[in-house]
């Protein structure tokens, strides 16, 4: 927005825009000053005025990555994994380039090279992070980019979502195999995942103080999207929790007292044991239990808002990616 002011007996128009040199001119009348300011702003919008690239000339891509890592990433819940990803960017040859020479072609080449090494889903996440970094640089740090260099870089095709659900009999053999472990935590985790659709990280974060037996609800405070939620518990989930021996009566004690790596190792050992008689179990991931739970919620007749309340999905499109209904299970609904 232009500034029009009286200055030394004349009218002065001043235009300031981030990333561009200041424009100013004096006129005898205010009307002429306003008219000139409008024309200059129009030229800015059409790109007729060259932006000031001094900041881009002085800053390398590495400088931008490190600043984002140390000021933005550090405040995120998933800062460890994002920091690792940014550190890998810093080692790339293009991290040494000045921002004034960065173009879409740089990242298109990077995409093509990465696709020879990693899965498309990984490349999509990396390009998404790079685009977010440039968005912050443009909108919050006043870097004078004409546009986001990642805006025109085509992401690899999104892979099809997994549709693995429990096959008949798998629930029973998994629970039976998990009983052989010295601690009850694995069986408890499998049952709660199937009954609530909680993620592994959420299962390992809930404490006894989050459980309300009287209302049959569980408060999940540490979630992936940062929004806490209270979920209803089935009778199976409540009975299972009541049968767990609590080591102490402290509310802050974790319901599943295992680290993430220890839980994952127990899960893998359990699958290998089952695989001796049921080889196809090896294709099952623990996260697939969440798919199973969400799909079952829909099959028993819960609405989209009800399922979203339990699963924590804030975007229905993402919720449907977790939903894999079986045609065989709904035949009776269309043939009453």
Image: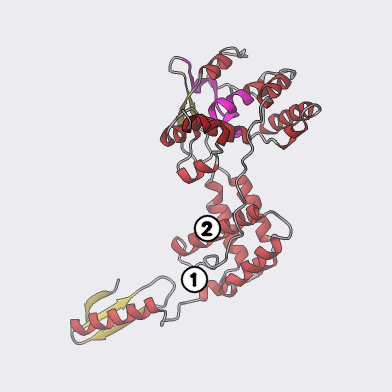
Residue 231 % position (x, y): 47, 27
Q: Is residue 165 above or below residue 135?
A: above
Compute the Cα span from label 2 to label 1. 14 Å
Give residue 258's quadrant in the image.
top right
Q: Residue at x 23, y 76 (%)?
A: 5
Q: Is residue 303 above or below residue 3?
A: above
Q: Is residue 327 above or below residue 43?
A: above
Give residue 172's quadrant in the image.
top right
Q: Residue at x 49, y 61 (%)?
A: 135
Tell me the magenta residue range. 190-213
Which residue in the structure is indicated by mark 2? 132
Judging from the image, what secondary structure is the residue with disc 2 in?
helix
Residue 289 % position (x, y): 61, 32
Q: Is residue 102 visible?
A: yes
Q: Is residue 193 magenta?
A: yes
Q: Is residue 314 above or below residue 66?
A: above
User: In the image, is 273 to the left or to the right of 70?
Assistant: right
Judging from the image, what secondary structure is the residue with disc 1 in?
loop
Residue 221 % position (x, y): 49, 31
Which of 86/333 is in front? 333
Q: Is residue 300 magenta?
A: no
């Amino acid at each position: 927005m232009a500034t029009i002011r009286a200055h030394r007996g004349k009218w002065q128009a001043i235009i300031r825009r981030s990333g561009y040199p200041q424009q100013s001119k004096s006129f005898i009348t205010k009307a002429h000053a306003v008219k000139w300011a409008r024309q200059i702003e129009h030229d800015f919008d059409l790109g007729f005025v060259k932006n000031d690239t001094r900041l881009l000339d002085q800053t390398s891509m590495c400088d931008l990555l490190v600043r984002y890592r140390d000021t933005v990433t550090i405040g995120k819940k998933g800062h460890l994994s994002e920091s690792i990803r940014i550190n890998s960017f810093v080692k790339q040859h293009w991290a040494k380039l000045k921002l004034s020479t960065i173009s879409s072609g740089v990242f298109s080449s990077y995409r093509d090279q990465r696709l020879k090494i990693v899965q498309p889903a990984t490349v999509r996440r990396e390009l998404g992070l790079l685009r977010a970094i440039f968005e912050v640089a443009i909108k919050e740090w006043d870097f004078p980019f004409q546009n986001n260099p990642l805006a025109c870089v085509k992401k690899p095709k999104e892979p099809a979502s997994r549709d693995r659900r429990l096959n008949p009999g798998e629930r029973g053999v998994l629970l039976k195999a998990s009983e052989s472990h010295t601690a009850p935590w694995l069986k408890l985790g499998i049952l709660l995942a199937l009954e609530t659709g909680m993620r592994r990280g959420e299962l390992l974060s809930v404490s006894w103080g989050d459980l309300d037996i009287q209302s049959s609800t569980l408060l999940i405070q540490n979630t992936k999207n940062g929004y806490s939620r209270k979920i209803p518990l089935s009778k199976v989930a409540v009975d299972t929790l009541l049968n767990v021996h609590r080591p102490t009566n402290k509310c802050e004690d974790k319901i599943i007292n295992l680290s993430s790596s220890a839980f994952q190792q127990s899960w893998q050992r359990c699958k290998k044991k089952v695989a001796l008689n049921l080889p196809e179990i090896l294709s099952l991931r623990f996260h697939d239990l969440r798919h199973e739970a969400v799909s079952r919620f829909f099959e028993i007749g819960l609405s989209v808002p009800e399922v979203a309340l339990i699963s924590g999905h804030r975007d229905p499109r993402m919720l449907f990616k977790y939903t894999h209904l079986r045609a065989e299970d709904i035949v009776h609904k269309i043939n009453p």
